[in-house]
Amino acid sequence: MKNKFDVIIVGAGHAGTEAAFAAANLGSKVLLLVTNLNCIAMMPCNPSIGGPGKGHLIREIHALGGQIAKHVDESYLQIRELNESRGPAVRALRAQADKVLYHLIVKQAIENHPNITLLQAEATDIIHTNNIVEGVKIITGLSYYTKSVVLATGTFLNGKIIIGDKKNDGGPSNESPTKILAESLINLGVKIHRLQTATPPRIDGASINFNNLRELPGHEHIQTFTGLKPKKNQRSCYLTFTNEKTIKIIQDNLKESPLKLGNITQHGPKHCPSIDRKVINFPDKHLHQIFIEPESNFHNEWYLQGVTTSMPPHIQELIIHSIEGLENAKIVRYGYAIEYDAIRGTQLRKSMELKSVEGLFTCGQINGTSGYEEAAAQGLIAGINAHLKAYNLKPFILKRTSSFIANMMDELVTNERDEPLRVTTSSSEFRLHLRTDNAEERLTHIGYKLGLVKQKQFDLVNKNKEIINNEIKAMHEHKIRPTKEVLNYIENTLKSDSFKKPITYAELLSRNEIHYKNLEYFGYKCVEDPILIRKIEIQLKYQNFLDKLQKKMKYSDQLDDMILNQFSYQKVNGLSNETIIILNKLQAYNIGQISILKSLKPGDLSLIVNNYKQNMKDN
Ligand SMILES: Cc1cc2nc3c(=O)[nH]c(=O)nc-3n(C[C@H](O)[C@H](O)[C@H](O)COP(=O)(O)OP(=O)(O)OC[C@H]3O[C@@H](n4cnc5c(N)ncnc54)[C@H](O)[C@@H]3O)c2cc1C
């Protein structure tokens, strides 16, 4: 049948496209609906991908066989490693993508995919019988049928654009909002709430005075998201600051801020406050960083990171012109805030399927997250599970110790929140293990088993893993004796402490000031690949901490392995009625999920674990 598909995806943003690639690469016939083909992988905010936490997600998506890392690597203007001088858990890649090229690359990849049918059409209704999905209706009245629908509508649902005292219907980047689909969801019993986010004004690059600004060039000594050597001739970003004058302008005009006018009543992302919010919260702080960043090689619009605002246009002009380098800046797009419908993530299972509607998956900003990376990560998981559902297979669930993706998903589906969820490095207690440098070693085998990672990528990761393991073993076996010559080198050249008894290379490398390549002095034949060297060094320098973490991770894995199938909380002695109601509503997949439930009282987890173990023994 021409209008029948394995999976139908509504929305071709960062979540929808990743979901489409995942399902299609696993063999599903996919229909991808989008309101406007120009909105495919659109970046309505800063075209920057990565950073702490978010960069981890991109590396993990790549390791699992997702596509965003590849598309960013093909389109970046600049790539840097943030927090280079800090600990490995917080180091992160950040790329400034060319938003025009990125959109074209993703669009082409979709057009060229034999399993994806792309259609510009607004989805208006979820077709279902008794809350079991059967398909999607589009605005022309045509219907398409499937067992698995993925909704990835971003900030479009009932979007309202806010600037000053104006609040009008609108979607991101002046697109039209979509209104009818939200009704269909409400009719299905899905609970909707309102969230908000905002973006700064864009500047014509020809009007910026770069002379006194600090230049931030790209890095060439690192590896890109897919592990390649960065290209030469990257574009630079620049740094400037607000000053007393800027702050005074904002303070004098706060009465016109939508925050004060009551025009913005919903919560925005906590980690990305508007400049008016910063001034309200920290009135004495005058110096706020502003990064001036190019958006594309195809046009000359520049993004001003750090000065998000939806103040009226004439005040935006005053604010921008008070900043060094931007005195004569020409604003080509004014900043604005957008308010939109989102669904509470707690209505979802870990597979991203709605608990109340069989076969309906949601992912991305519609779930109350914020960010391209969070959207893409959810898209990957939703796409995989929509495919598995279409083929009547068991859902794909990642353990919390495997990835930031798993931690984000668990948090999203377990705990309610009123502001958009963003991933940071503090989002996981296992962050020292869940680093960007070891994403491949952690996840490639899982992506390979799923069928998303190609043989070549899998073989390469295995080969590298073997080299790393052999090196680490060798470091523990080789000992060095404190001869006069050795101590002279250690103390005077490497500026490290002397030692009296023989010590292993591993012990030596646990010292901050000693590097793997220093071992060549002792005649050791080091591996040459700088990426592998880095992995080996991190492993050895943080061995003690990683060993301590192992115990915690083992416990977490045990809890994740306790799958809850028709588990009766009523039968757990000691749980309050209130807790039983919460747990019944949660419909947790495993006890691991329960362990992060914020409303759980101390002691409740042990009661549940003990009861679970007893049940297992009895059966
Ligand atoms: C003003 C603004 C500021 C932002 N600021 C930041 C920021 O600072 N940092 C950050 O990381 N992120 C920011 N974001 C968020 C970022 O844009 C999103 O997180 C990301 O785009 C979400 O991806 P998504 O795939 O969920 O949705 P989107 O990228 O919004 O894609 C949604 C897709 O759904 C389609 N669609 C919607 N409804 C329908 C329908 N009924 N039928 C068919 N297709 C439909 C659209 O055409 C689009 O293709 C901002 C977004 C906006 C709008």
Image (cartoon, grey):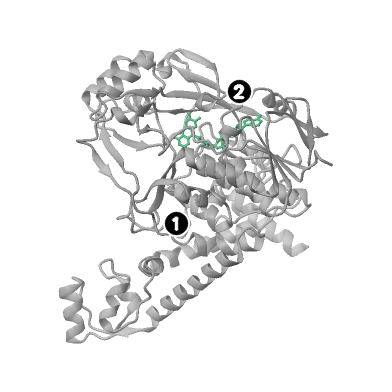
Q: Can residue 61 be seen in this view?
A: yes
Name the quadrant where ligand 1 sits. top right
Q: Where is mark 1, residue-wise?
A: 436
In percent of width and height, residue 247 lies at 27, 23
Q: Is residue 310 above or below residue 398?
A: above
Report how far apart the C-alphas of labels 1 and 2 lie in the structure. 36 Å
In percent of width and height, residue 47 lies at 44, 39
Nearest to the observer: residue 231 or residue 147: 231
Looking at the image, residue 578 sits to the left or right of residue 531; the answer is: right
In percent of width and height, residue 436 lies at 44, 57
Corner quadrant of residue 539? bottom left
Task: Inspect the image, locate mark 2, and give the three-letter code of the amino acid beneath it.
Answer: Asn
Q: Where is mark 2, residue-wise?
A: 158
Q: In this view, does 281 lie above or below 444?
A: above
Instruction: Check mark 1 vs ligand 1: CB closer than 8 Å? yes or no.
Output: no
Mark 2: secondary structure? loop
